[in-house]
Every structure is written in structure tokens, then in C-alpha cells.
Amino acid sequence: MSSIIAIRQNEFCDPEALQDAVQDGQSDIAQLEPGQITVKLTHLTLGSVGASTGDFTRGIRQRGVLSPNRWVFGFIANPAVICYHDMAPDDLLILAPGQELYSSFSGANNYVTVLAEQEEMFARLTHEPGAQDAPAWGQPSTMLTTDPALAAARTAEVRKLLGVIAKQGTTMPPWEAEHYKHAILELVTAPVIDAAGYRYRGPRLRSEVALVREVENFVIEAGTRPLLISDLVVHAGVSRRALYRAFDEVHSMSPMEFLRRKQLSDAHNALLTATPGTTVEKAAIKHGFAHPGRFAKWYYSQFGERPNETLRRPSPFRRLQ
């Protein structure tokens, strides 16, 4: 019997699928780029080690704790803002257990995450002097970068191993599954102790991301109360120019445009997971849209379908409610 416990693969046409982007935690998702999205997810479990991979075709904002008790190692295929960093393709993100990840993807992307318990991970590093004392283990998040060719080769090897597991995992004998698990752990932990070229990427956007997150928290707390740009400026305690610059750096759009797309995403989720008695008009008003016709126009532009179509069609997310 293989030590692989589960292999789950699904394809969706809703941004809500990315709430389950990483198997250990739930993320809050806002679709930022207009157009119907396609999401493909794969979740693998090899004993105490997990892996989640995915593709999505539209830009999103993601925030949430990816794992409460496991370290997360992640790669992406295209540039994005991750935590406080400009993350380049094949950079390695290391996230400590229980840490929130805040990410902004401007367009389509592909990601790989590997999740490992500290005890097993450190057991694999005991033969490396000083490995357990590496700076990355003392930080909430770390971004490691190196020569693009070296980074791409390492990421390609991780993807190759996970691809084999996804196709053949259920028939692998235990010894083979263990071999693949250890090979993946070595690939994602080696850069932490690799003296041959890996270096730490500084958090260029620390103040900008912190400001955007604070404003977004204020927007969430405000609920359906109408907000003006002056309300955001007063709450943040910064100039209008500084607020616009932060949102442009992180999300490539103005604060009010982000607010509208976040509200549209919340309305989409409400319609997709609707309970009996929900109507398009009720959902629109609840999420800050007082004019149903204008709401329907914006909604169609953002998601490629009309609000009543989302409400009527069968949804796996509705069954989960």
C-alpha cells in the first residue's frame, strides 16, 4: 500500500475555487482582472508532507493563513506581489506555520506549494551543520532568489516529481512513495542552506502592502456602508497621493477600483453559494450596489456571465454551505 493518502484534481470556472488553493487552509479571494476565470487544482498527500499546485487564468488578490501547523514552500510561474516582496518566477517563498499570506497576481499564473512539518523537515537536515539555525526558520516569511537558470531547474524538478506522483501515486509501493517525498523535501529545503548562489530578497513593498491591508480591513469592517476616497485617506492617516501609490504598487489599480472589484467578488460569492430566498437585487444591495442595472453591467464585465446566471447554475460551492 502506498504512503500517498490522497490525490485530488479538479477544474472550476469560479474564483471561489482558489479559496482551497492550498490544502491546509482557506483563503479569501477577490478577482481583480475582468473575464471568466478557469482554475485547475491538484492536492497531493504523502504521509506528513503535502503539496498543492494550481493554474488560474485571471488576476486575483489572495489573503489567508495557508497552514496553521506546517511550513509552506512556494514557487510561482509569473511575477507577483507576495507578502511584502516582488516575487519573480522560480523564487522560493518560505512561510512559517500560522502566518498570513497576502498576494496580488496581475494576471494568469501557476503555483506550486509544498507543506512540511518542522519535526520531519529538521530530521532530514540533521546531517547539515547549522541547517536548523538558518535565518529563514526564525522569520515569518522569507524570499530566496538565485540565478534564473538554477532556480528554474530546481522548480522544474519539483514540478516533474509532483507530476509523476499525481499520475502514478496510487499504484506506487511504499518505498517509492517515500523516495519521492524525501526528494521533494530536499529540493525545497536545500536553498535555505545552499551557499552556492541563493540570497535573500528584501521586502521592497513592506510599507505599501501594510497600508493596503489596513485599508482593506477598514473596508471589510465598514460592510455595506458607502465609502469615499476621503474616508480611506482619513482612516489610513496618509495623503491621497500616498494611498494611490500604494494601491498602484500592490494591485495596479486605484483604491476605489479595488474596492469595487472586491465588492463584485463578494457579490459573486453570495450568488454562487446562495440559500433559498436570495435574489440578485438583495445580493447587490447587500454588497454596496444601489443600482441593479449598473451592478449587472459591471458584474458581466468582471465575470463573463450575468448575476442571474450565477444564481441559477449548479455549483459545488453551494453544496458546501
Image: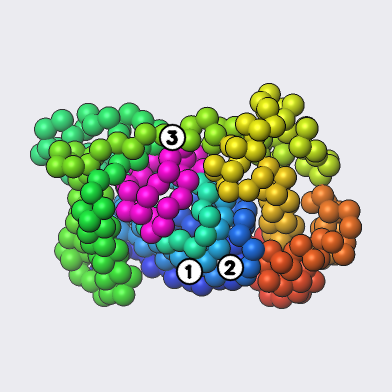
Pick the quarter of the image with the C terminus.
bottom right
Q: Which residues are magenta?
A: 74-102
State whether residue 209 appears in this view. yes
The verdict on residue 179 being magenta is: no
Q: Residue 143, percent across and down? A: 35, 40
The verdict on residue 88 being magenta is: yes
Question: Crowding near pointer 2: few (<14 within 10 Å), some, many (20+)?
Answer: many
Q: Residue 147, percent across and down? A: 23, 49
Q: Secondary structure at mark 1?
A: strand
Comes first in the chain, label 3 or label 2: 2
Identity of the residue drawn at 83% across and 42% down = 226
Q: Amino acid at mark 1?
A: Lys
For marks 1 and 2, give the one nearer the viewer. Answer: 2
Mark number, residue 40:
1
For marks 3 and 1, give the one nearer the viewer. Answer: 3
For marks 3 and 2, give the one nearer the viewer. Answer: 3
Mark number, residue 204:
3
Residue 15 left/right relative to 1: right
Residue 44 left/right relative to 306: left
Q: Which residue is mark 2?
A: 37
Q: Residue furthest top?
A: 237
Number of numbered discs? 3
Identity of the residue drawn at 76% across and 37% down = 229
